[in-house]
Image (cartoon, helix red, strand yellow):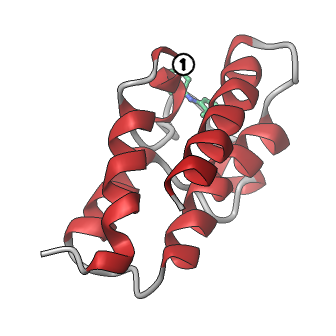
Amino acid sequence: RLNKELAPCRQVLDDLESHDEAWPFLLAVNTKQFPTYRKVIRNPMDLQTIGKRLSQNEYKSRDEFVSDVRLIFDNCETFNEDNSPVGKAGHTLRLFFETRWADLT
Ligand SMILES: Cc1ncccc1N[C@H]1CCCS(=O)(=O)C1
């Protein structure tokens, strides 16, 4: 059972996973498709991983959850051009997250 403090995390994660622009972030970046990724991005993160951590009660606070979500978008900006399809999706989903999170907390 998610304690009260973490309830908004499950809600916003569900909203992120169902967003049209979430496709680049649903699963860990495939390092066979992107062989340089793990060299450039030292702390990979994705929405499936966050969901597992949430279900396994690995987040002790909302802030730990928010840090992992923001890591997705920061990694995206590091690796992708702003005007690339993945880069644009990252900017769009980051704005959606920050807006939704502000509404919920
Ligand atoms: C978030 C990200 N950063 C860098 C490279 C790739 C990705 N995501 C990939 C996820 C699978 C589909 S794709 O291969 O088009 C894009």
- Tell me where residue 47 appears, x and y as whole percent: 42, 46
Instruction: Name the image quarter holding the C terminus.
Output: bottom right
The residue depicted at 31 percent of the width and 55 percent of the height is: 10
- Tell me where residue 73 appears, x and y as whole percent: 69, 44
Question: Where does ligand 1 appear, by image quarter?
Answer: top right
Residue that carries the numbered disc 1 in the rendered image: 21
**Element carrying mark 1:** helix
- Tell me where residue 98 appears, x and y as whole percent: 67, 46
* Amino acid tagged 1: Glu
Left/right of residue 77 with respect to residue 35 in the rendered view: right
The residue depicted at 71 percent of the width and 35 percent of the height is: 95
Residue located farthest toward the bottom when viewing the structure as drawn: 60
Asked whether 8 or 72 is in front, the reply is 8
Left/right of residue 10 with respect to residue 80 in the rendered view: left
Q: Is residue 47 visible?
A: yes
Compared to 87, does 100 lie above or below? below
The crowd level at tag 1 (other Cα within 10 Å; few <14, some 14-19, many 20+) is: some
Left/right of residue 61 with respect to residue 94 in the rendered view: left
Asked whether 92 or 6 is in front, the reply is 6
> Mark 1 near ligand 1 (CB under 8 Å)?
no
Asked whether 48 or 17 is in front, the reply is 17
Compared to 102, does 55 lie above or below? below
Left/right of residue 97 with respect to residue 94 in the rendered view: left
Compared to 26, does 72 lie above or below? below
Instruction: Name the image quarter holding the N terminus.
Output: bottom left
The residue depicted at 57 percent of the width and 51 percent of the height is: 101
- Tell me where residue 97 appears, x and y as whole percent: 60, 42
